[in-house]
Image (cartoon, coloured by chain):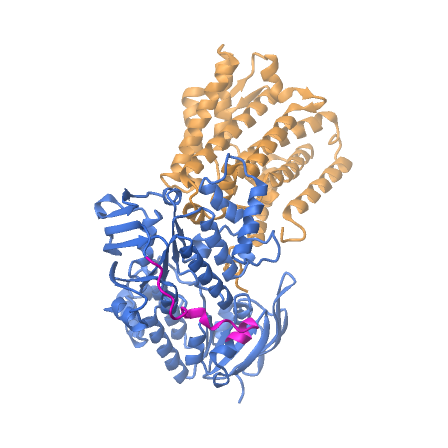
Chain colours: A orange, B blue
């Protein structure tokens, strides 16, 4: 990195500082129960953040993941509760998210709608469709607690809560994918400069399709972790502001909105900071409104910082010719 | 006489790295002052400090004897210092007239009145631009004209041009120089950055040469000649053959017919053009801006998709081809090296190795779906050596390189794709003198190796120096073909204009 003190490192320091501050000042922050819930929330946010990062690195964005996640998982639970074998229900949910991702990708790549509008609209479509046909009741609970499925989000391996393990696996897979897979490199190329990517011979449009399908599948994984950790899922999540938390995680971690920059490490540090902050605010018993103001202010600051750190002006355009 | 602008010991550092070190610069009233130097010599930075785009880290800028510190270009403008940038700062979705008067409109404007005023003004400058045309529909040269006209209209005392002639055809250059002379007669001082030494010798009153951010020479033009300038710029004397093919060298023989373009049309830009390209040869393509040379190259390489109703046929080794996306062309061995590398040439956040490897991956030349880091480094090492690409270190991002090195990266990114046909569009635009000769030598080597090479250029000496065949385009089609033996600058120019 060109900067001596990268955004990634600054965020990590702030996160550590906050953690220490909250541990000292907040009663119950360090309790086992709270740390478990912190870790669960952080993991779900982190998994979604990985998906969002893949979108933003490829110079896109996916606002529909917060609809895809609860709708597909609510349907999955409904199918399971209705007596379908778990593996069959999982396949159905997988098919659903692949279709959603493919439609997103198609709209963005072939119809050439800006990602922000395509996925914004698709989010509403998915929520509406899910509400009408897949999960008419907002809250869906797990009734059959078959050991292996239930333990995806609520078990422990060697004392480590499984959501953390799933997050770690997703993050590691995404890290390897982005860094070493041909398709991952193409996503960086497209994000860096779509025109160059096209001329160089990268299959830009099919790649976008793949990209948004991957993101949708990651949303499904996050949803399964969430549902099994909390014994159910509420489709009203689609109407919440959680999608902004996810963007916050990604941008704060240091993935530039202009594309092509950053990686999974940035998501991890961003997730840590936001997870600790959200948890601390909840313990402090701040009202939802105050929390929203704080979060949105931080998001704005992060975007401003992003613009300052990754400027798109005459100066950078000319950087090669000083 | 009191100098108009005086800079004393100015230094500019970017993140601690000096771009300009302790430079003194004096601009007199009514003087044409050329600023020469290789890419990365600090010319742009020096002029940006005059015009308020950046501020000097140390040193002083004085305007008519009074110390000034412009914080923005608009502050400089109110003091009578204007800068015309390489990258145009026009609003693409507005008309030429609207752009000319942008910021100076009355509360209510009659569009017709605006257009008439713009028309009169443009004609007074001898610029052939339609004031009602949208800026986005103009070519690079016309955009530049509008940009210049806008600066002239502000009645400034100093106009700084950053490579004003890079995008202009010879005809337009003559108009531009005439304009500069007229501005001078009106008492306006001109600073212009240039790569073309002949231009500086022809029109400048005074020449300042920078090298590696330091002042090497500054004197009246009469004190210089081509050779002394080059020596001052690069710190060494280049072989004289830079733009002159060794006399007596025969053109390469015609090889296999690789590509034939037959009656291809597209809109009003490419009209029923036909020509062929052979392997083992350099086919030079000369034409004025707007003559369809870039567009036909982009059609061949699949970058512009051509609709069926436009008719015509492109045959690759006698097989008809019609590419929808560049990927198909790349896989068939046709690559296009862009004229605008910043927009569509390289991946700026990536290192040289990553850029080159992206070419390998896209062409499907790397086995498997996993990136082989060893292979990536090996390719980078090989090509940085072949093309003598200079970077501070292996982790330098391409955006941090100088123009010449960036161009070499773009060229190698195409060559790692193992093409059969390579099309260079303005291969040496915005490239410093040293790199130009290296790139030319390399292009010659490619043809010797048997590739079919096309060089599109609006710089006649380049065409004459490199080509084994010369095609001239005009109004969307190839109108004439010359052999190097019979071609002269005059003949080619005549074919391109009439």
Identify the image quadrant of residue A244. Answer: top right
Observer-nearest residue: A180 or A299?
A180
- Residue B231 belongs to magenta span: yes
Q: Decide if residue B239 is on the left or right side of residue B424.
A: right
Can residue B356 be spotted in the picture?
A: yes
View extreme (right): residue: A24
- Residue B206 belongs to magenta span: no
Q: Decide if residue B220 is on the left or right side of residue B321.
A: right
Image point 36% across, 60% down: which residue? B252
Which quadrant: the C terminus of chain A? bottom right
Observer-nearest residue: B49 or B496?
B496
**Percent from the top left, x then y, of residue A57?**
52, 42
Observer-nearest residue: A257 or A277?
A257
Q: Decide if residue B324 is on the left or right side of residue B223.
A: left
From what the image shows, is residue B238 above or below residue A240? below
Give the magenta-colored segment's residue range: B230-253
Q: Main secondary structure of the magenta part?
A: loop
From what the image shows, is residue B479 above or below residue A189? below
**Percent from the top left, x then y, of residue B274?**
24, 54
Image point 35% across, 79% down: which residue? B178
Q: How many marks?
A: 0
View extreme (top): residue: A83
Image point 48% across, 50% down: which residue? B413
**Percent from the top left, x then y, of residue B169?**
34, 68
Identify the image quadrant of residue B190. Answer: bottom left
Can residue B25 be spotted in the picture?
A: no
Observer-nearest residue: B104 or A179?
A179
**Percent from the top left, x then y, of residue B473?**
27, 61
């Amino acid at each position: 990195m060109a900067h001596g003190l990268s955004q990634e490192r600054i965020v990590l320091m702030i996160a550590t500082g906050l953690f220490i501050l909250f541990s000292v000042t907040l009663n119950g922050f360090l309790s086992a129960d709270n740390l478990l819930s912190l870790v669960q929330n952080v993991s779900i946010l982190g998994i979604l953040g990985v998906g969002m990062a893949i979108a933003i690195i490829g110079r896109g964005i996916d606002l529909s993941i917060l609809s895809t996640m609860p709708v597909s998982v609510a349907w999955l639970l409904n199918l399971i509760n209705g007596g379908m074998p778990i593996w069959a229900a999982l396949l159905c949910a997988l098919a659903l998210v692949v279709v959603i991702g493919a439609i997103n990708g198609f709209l963005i790549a072939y119809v050439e709608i800006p990602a922000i509008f395509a996925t914004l609209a698709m989010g509403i479509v998915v929520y509406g469709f899910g509400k009408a046909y897949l999960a008419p009741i907002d809250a869906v609970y797990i009734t059959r607690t078959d050991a292996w499925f239930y333990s995806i989000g609520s078990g422990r391996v060697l004392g480590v809560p499984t959501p953390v393990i799933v997050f770690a696996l997703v993050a590691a897979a995404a890290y390897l994918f982005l860094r070493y897979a041909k398709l991952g490199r193409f996503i960086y190329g497209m994000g860096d400069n779509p025109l160059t990517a096209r001329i160089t011979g990268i299959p830009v449009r099919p790649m976008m399709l793949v990209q948004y399908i991957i993101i949708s599948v990651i949303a499904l994984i996050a949803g399964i972790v969430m549902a099994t950790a909390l014994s159910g899922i509420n489709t009203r999540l689609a109407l919440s502001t959680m999608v902004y938390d996810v963007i916050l995680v990604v941008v704060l971690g240091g993935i530039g909105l202009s594309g092509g920059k950053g990686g999974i490490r940035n998501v991890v540090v961003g997730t840590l900071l936001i997870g600790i902050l959200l948890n601390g605010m909840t313990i402090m018993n701040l009202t939802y409104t105050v929390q929203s103001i704080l979060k949105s202010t931080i998001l704005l600051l992060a975007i401003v910082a992003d613009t300052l750190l990754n400027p798109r002006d005459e100066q950078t355009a000319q950087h090669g010719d000083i | 006489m009191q100098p108009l602008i005086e800079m004393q010991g100015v230094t500019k550092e970017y993140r601690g790295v000096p771009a300009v070190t302790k430079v003194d610069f004096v601009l007199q009233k009514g003087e044409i002052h050329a600023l020469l130097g290789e890419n990365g010599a600090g010319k742009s930075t020096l002029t940006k400090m005059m015009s308020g785009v950046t501020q000097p880290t140390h040193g002083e800028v004085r305007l008519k004897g009074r110390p000034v510190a412009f914080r923005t270009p608009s502050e400089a403008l109110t003091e009578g210092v204007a800068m015309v940038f390489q990258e145009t700062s026009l609003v693409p979705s507005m008309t030429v007239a609207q752009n000319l008067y942008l910021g100076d409109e009355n509360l209510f404007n009659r569009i017709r009145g605006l257009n008439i005023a713009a028309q009169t003004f443009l004609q007074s400058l001898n610029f052939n631009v339609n004031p009602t045309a949208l800026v986005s529909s103009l070519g690079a040269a016309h955009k530049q004209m509008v940009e210049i006209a806008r600066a002239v209209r502000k009645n400034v005392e100093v106009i700084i041009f950053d490579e004003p002639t890079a995008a202009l055809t010879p005809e337009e250059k003559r108009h531009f120089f005439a304009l500069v002379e007229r501005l001078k007669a009106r008492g306006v001082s001109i600073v212009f950055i240039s790569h073309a030494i002949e231009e500086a010798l022809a029109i400048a009153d005074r020449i300042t040469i920078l090298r590696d951010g330091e002042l090497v020479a500054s004197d009246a033009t009469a004190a210089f000649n081509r050779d002394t300038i080059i020596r001052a710029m690069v710190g060494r004397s280049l072989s004289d053959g830079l733009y002159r093919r060794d006399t007596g060298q025969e053109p390469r023989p015609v090889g296999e017919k690789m590509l034939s373009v037959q009656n291809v049309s597209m809109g009003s830009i490419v009209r029923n053009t036909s020509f062929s390209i052979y392997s083992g040869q350099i086919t030079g393509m000369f034409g004025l801006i707007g003559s369809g040379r870039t567009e036909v190259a982009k059609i061949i390489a699949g970058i512009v998709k051509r609709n069926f109703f436009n008719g015509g046929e492109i045959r690759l080794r006698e097989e008809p081809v019609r590419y929808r996306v560049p990927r198909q062309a790349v896989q068939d061995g046709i690559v296009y090296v862009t004229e605008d590398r910043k927009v569509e040439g390289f991946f700026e956040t990536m290192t040289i190795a990553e850029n080159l490897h992206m070419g390998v991956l896209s062409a499907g030349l790397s086995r498997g779906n996993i990136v082989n880091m060893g292979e990536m480094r090996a390719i980078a090492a090989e090509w940085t050596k072949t093309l003598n690409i200079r970077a501070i270190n292996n982790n330098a991002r391409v955006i941090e390189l100088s123009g010449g090195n960036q161009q070499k990266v773009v060229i190698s990114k195409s060559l790692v794709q193992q093409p059969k046909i390579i099309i260079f569009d303005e291969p040496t635009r915005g490239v410093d003198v040293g790199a130009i000769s290296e790139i030319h030598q390399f292009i010659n080597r490619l043809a010797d190796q048997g590739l079919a090479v096309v060089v599109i250029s609006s710089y006649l000496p380049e065409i004459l120096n490199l080509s084994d065949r010369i095609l001239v385009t005009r109004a969307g089609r190839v109108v004439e073909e010359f052999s190097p033996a019979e071609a002269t600058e005059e003949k080619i120019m005549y074919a391109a204009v009439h």
